[in-house]
Image (cartoon, grey):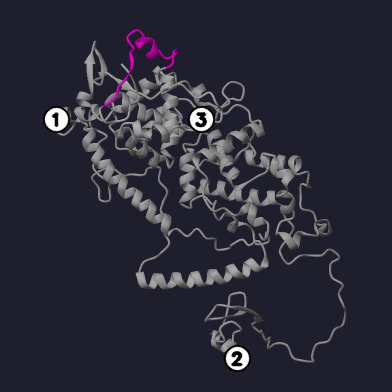
């Protein structure tokens, strides 16, 4: 087809002197040898027009308002509104309730997002609430960007404030709305849906209407190259809650799926841990005064902290495992040996067998995640460019990359892009069916890990070790995980990495939350602390040839 169109053009290429021309999708001629794009375009002849048969009868002056070829006038906040709407609609298609989009305290489907966008447009930027039709007041619009206010949006004065909308804040607003509506979707679940492509974020600008053209400085606002971390989105959510001055959130009771009492069941199932651990976790919450719903409900007047439900629940599971099995590189293996000697039916939980099963499944899951991440296409189908010159260069590189990709697919006989599968709240699948990660251990009993003392079930492990729990005074102090990691037991480190993989957070981030839970467990107000204070002995133990271990409380 290209040969028929370009057969009449026999000029050699200015770069490689080859005469091999093709026609791009935009109608421009390009050299097939070096992919050089020239200004010549495809000539279209309309056979219905007869030369000399038409004449000009009138001369139209056209519209008095200059209309740009780049679409209608629009503002940056309108682009974020479309992106927020698309993200909310994607969650609705995944099963989120419709009340998720309603404004707090009303029945209208505007939500906190529109409240924030209104305050941003009218209060922060001091610009008209609509784009308007006076194009002369935005004379630089068609030169620097596709939107009207991208230049002023990126000004130094507005950047100093914290009220400007950003792509990261769209996820923070979605997280706030999910928490308000008490949806069983944690922040780690939301970020996983974003990474798997079920919720638009990285290339969310592709779904904007055709009349909203993104060019120039719009790329600095809407271009996204990575998904933000759990910590970054949580901090943005806290800032937005203070900025929006939201009322008290609906209470998160024990019947709510976000409460650790129920959310822990999901993490125990995903980690293939026995169901008998759940009563111990609930007892631990009671001792630490963490079962009260006021601790898990954001109230600006009394508890102005947005809980990290997923990270806190995972920390509770880890502390429960330390309480029952020790996790000091000795006690857990001794208990496994006793379980193997006493159990003939295979119904007693063995941590050694569980470790081997989870370690193999974890390696396979990590390899699968890394492979899918390497095959994922991060580049946008509608790339954003700062200027016209960059657009031509990137178009040429994109055409070369597409041809190399086609050649790779033909040579490897397999697709290079990973198709997103159906979303799931679980990383692993346990059972006897085909495709399972291994046999289920949910039904197993704790066996010798717990004993009956004074008609009360008590962990057989008499000690509980923990690092120094005194919090840092300095506000600028960061996590000390990298400093203490060499002194911590290897089993504990492995368990941190397992739950870090389940939540897609860093081990240091989860380690800090484990310390926070332990501070509550061993605080002076805790019933557990009051019970054991008179016989509590804190000692430091050092092993020969090894760095000094953390503190132990007996």
Query: For the point 21% across and 37% down, which residue is it?
Result: 353
The residue that mark 3 highlights is 307
Please report the residue visible at 38 percent of the width from the left and 25 percent of the height from the top. Answer: 467
Q: Where's residue 138, x and y in %?
A: 80, 57
| Residues shaded magenta | 523-543
| Residue 532 visible somewhere in the drawing | yes
- Mark 3 to mark 2 CA distance (whole Å): 69 Å
Marks 3/1: CA distance? 41 Å
Most foreground residue, 515 or 418: 515
> Which residue carries the number 2 mark?
10
Q: Position of residue 207 (x, y in %)?
A: 59, 57
Q: Quadrant of the C terminus?
A: top left
Q: Find numbered disc 2 in the image and state the secondary structure of the residue it sits on.
A: loop
Q: Are marks 3 and 2 in contact (CB under 8 Å)?
A: no
Magenta segment: does it hold 236? no
The quadrant holding residue 163 is: top right
* Residue 538 lies within the magenta run: yes
Q: Nearer the viewer, mark 1 or mark 2?
A: 2
The reply to whether the C-beta atoms of the residues labelled 1 and 2 are less than 8 Å apart is: no
- Dot 3: element: loop
Q: Residues within 10 Å of mark 3 (few under 14, many from 20)?
A: some
Q: Is residue 90 left or right of residue 497?
A: right
Comparing labels 3 and 2, the label whose residue is closer to the camera: 2
Q: Which residue is mark 1?
A: 343
């Amino acid at each position: 087809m290209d040969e028929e169109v370009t057969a009449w053009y026999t000029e050699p290429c200015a770069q490689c002197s080859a005469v091999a021309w093709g026609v791009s999708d935009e109608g421009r001629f390009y050299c097939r040898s070096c992919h050089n794009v020239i200004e010549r375009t495809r000539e279209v002849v309309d056979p219905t027009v007869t030369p000399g048969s038409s004449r000009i009868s009138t001369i139209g002056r056209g519209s008095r308002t200059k209309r740009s070829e780049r679409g209608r006038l629009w503002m940056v906040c309108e682009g974020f509104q479309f992106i927020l709407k698309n993200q909310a609609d994607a969650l609705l298609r995944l099963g989120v309730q419709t009340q998720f989009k309603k404004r707090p305290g009303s029945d209208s489907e505007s939500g906190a997002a529109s409240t924030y966008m209104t305050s941003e447009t009218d209060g922060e930027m001091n610009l008209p609430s609509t784009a308007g039709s006076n194009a002369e007041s935005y004379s630089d619009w068609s030169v620097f960007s596709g939107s009207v206010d991208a230049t002023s949006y990126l000004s130094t004065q507005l950047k100093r404030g914290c009220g400007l909308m950003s792509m990261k804040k769209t996820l923070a607003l979605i997280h706030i709305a999910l928490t308000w509506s008490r949806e069983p979707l944690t922040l780690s679940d939301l970020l996983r849906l974003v990474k798997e492509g079920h919720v638009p974020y990285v290339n969310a600008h592709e779904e904007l209407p055709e009349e909203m053209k993104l060019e120039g400085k719009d790329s600095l606002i809407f271009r996204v190259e990575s998904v933000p971390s759990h910590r970054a989105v949580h901090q943005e959510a806290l800032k937005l809650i203070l900025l929006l001055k939201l009322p008290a959130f609906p209470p998160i009771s024990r019947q709510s799926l976000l409460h650790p009492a129920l959310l822990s069941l999901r993490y125990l199932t995903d980690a293939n841990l026995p169901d008998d651990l759940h009563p111990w976790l609930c007892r631990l919450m009671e001792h630490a005064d963490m079962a009260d719903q006021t601790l898990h409900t954001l109230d600006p007047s009394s508890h102005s902290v947005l809980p990290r439900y997923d990270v806190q629940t995972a920390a509770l599971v880890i502390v429960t495992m330390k309480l029952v099995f020790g996790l000091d590189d000795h006690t857990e293996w001794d208990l496994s040996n006793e379980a193997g000697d006493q159990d003939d039916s295979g119904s007693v939980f063995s941590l050694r067998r569980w470790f081997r099963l989870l370690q193999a499944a974890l390696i396979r899951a990590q390899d699968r995640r890394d492979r899918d991440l390497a095959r994922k296409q991060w580049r946008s189908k509608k790339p954003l460019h700062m200027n016209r010159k960059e657009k031509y260069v990137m178009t040429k590189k994109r055409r070369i990359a597409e041809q190399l990709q086609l050649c790779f697919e033909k040579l490897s006989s397999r697709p290079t892009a990973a198709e997103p599968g159906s979303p799931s709240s679980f990383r692993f699948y346990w059972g006897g069916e085909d495709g399972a990660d291994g046999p289920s251990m949910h039904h197993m009993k704790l066996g010798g890990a717990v004993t009956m003392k004074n008609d009360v079930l008590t962990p057989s492990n008499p000690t509980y070790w923990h690092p120094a729990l005194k919090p840092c005074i300095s506000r600028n102090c960061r996590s000390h995980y990298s400093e203490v990691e060499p002194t911590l037991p290897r089993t504990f480190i492995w368990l941190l990495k397992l739950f870090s993989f389940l939540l897609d957070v860093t081990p240091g981030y989860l380690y800090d939350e484990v310390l926070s839970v332990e501070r509550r467990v061993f605080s002076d107000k805790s019933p557990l602390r009051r019970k054991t204070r008179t016989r509590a002995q804190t000692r430091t133990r050092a092993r020969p040839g090894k760095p000094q271990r953390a503190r132990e409380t007996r």
